[in-house]
Amino acid sequence: MYGCVLAGATIVLAKTSLTEGELRYQAQDSDSTHILTDEEYTEKARKAVANLPMKGLFCTGRAESFFSTSKFSELDERDFEEIPVTDTRSTVLAVCYTSGTTGMPKGAEITHHNYVSCFYTSRLQMPWEENDVLLGHSPITHMSGMFSTFAALLDGATCAVTPAMMGPLDIMNAVEKYKATAALLFPSQLQGLVREMQRTGRGLPSMRSIVVGGSVLPTSVADAARQAFVSIENLMNMYGMTESCGIVTSQPKT
C-alpha cells in the first residue's frame, strides 16, 4: 500500500467487508484507476468495477484478469524511481471513507501534510516509545491501521503485524508470543478480551499501555481492564475522526 504512495499514487481505503455495490460506489466516487486486493476478494472486485474505466487490476495471489504482485519480486529495484511530492499540503496521500452513519459515506482526503502533521501531534499523546512492541492488528484499510501502526514505527517502536480483527483468544496468544507492550483496541474488543482474561486467569504481564477509540468506553469496562491486566500503566480513551486523520482529543497519559 505504501509502495503505491511512494510511486506517486493516491490510495483509496476500501474495507473487505464492503458489498459489491458499496465498493463500486467508492471506486466511482474516488475516480479510482486501479484495484489492489487479495486473491480472496478478486471476484467481488471484478464485478464491482465492471464497465468502469480501470487501468489495471492487481492481486497478491493469482486470479484471472488480475496481475499478480508476486511478479514484482522479479523486477530490479534499481529501476524504481520515487516520485517527489513538491506540494505536500495539496497532494492527496489517501482517500478514507467515513462510516456513513448519517448518509452516504464521504471520502475524506488526507494529504501528505495531514499525515505527517498528525504523526507529530499524536506522538505527544500515544503511550508508546522506541522500546515498546505494538500489537499491529488494526486493519490497514481503516484509518486506525493506516496511521497508528506506521506512526508507531516512525516513533521507533517495534510492530508485531498480525491478522486484522482477531478474536480475544488470538489476541491473548499474540500478546504473549510477541511480548506486546502496547495495543490499540475498540471498546468491544477490549471488553471481549477482558472477559476471556477473567475466564482463563491470564494477566498478560507484558502489556503496559492500551489506547481505546472508535466508540464510547464504558466505565465498567475500563475498571475491569485495570484489574485484568496485571501490569497496566496507561489506559487511554481517545476520540478521533476519519476527516482529521487521527486523534482529535484524548485524556492525559495515566
Image (cartoon, grey):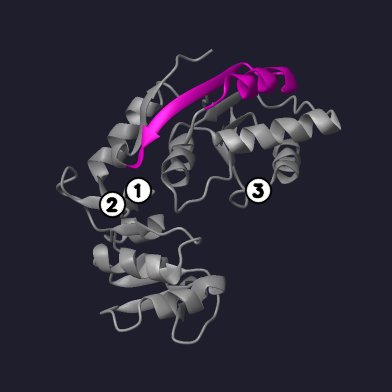
Helix, strand or loop for disc 1: loop
- Residue extending farthest to the right is 200
Crowding around mark 3 (Cα neighbors within 10 Å: few <14, some 14 to 19, many 20+) is some
Q: Quadrant of the N terminus?
A: bottom left
On the question of residue 179 being in view, the answer is no
Q: Mark 3 points at which residue?
A: 166
Q: Which mark is first along the chain, 2 or 3?
A: 2
Residue 223 magenta: yes
**Foreground: 236 or 231?**
236
Q: Residue at x 69, y 46 (%)?
A: 167
Amino acid marked by disc 3: Met
**Foreground: 197 or 33?**
197
The magenta-colored residue range is 217-242
Q: Mark 1 points at which residue?
A: 98
Disc 1 versus disc 2: distance between alpha carbons? 5 Å
Q: Name the residue under label 2.
A: 106
Which of pointers 3 and 2 indicates the residue nearer the eye? 2
Crowding around mark 1 (Cα neighbors within 10 Å: few <14, some 14 to 19, many 20+) is some
**Foreground: 114 or 22?**
22
Q: In this view, does 46 lie above or below 136?
A: below
Quadrant location of residue 134? Answer: top right
Judge left or right: residue 50 versus residue 66.
left
Crowding around mark 2 (Cα neighbors within 10 Å: few <14, some 14 to 19, many 20+) is some
C-beta proximity under 8 Å, tags 1 and 2? yes
Disc 3 versus disc 2: distance between alpha carbons? 27 Å
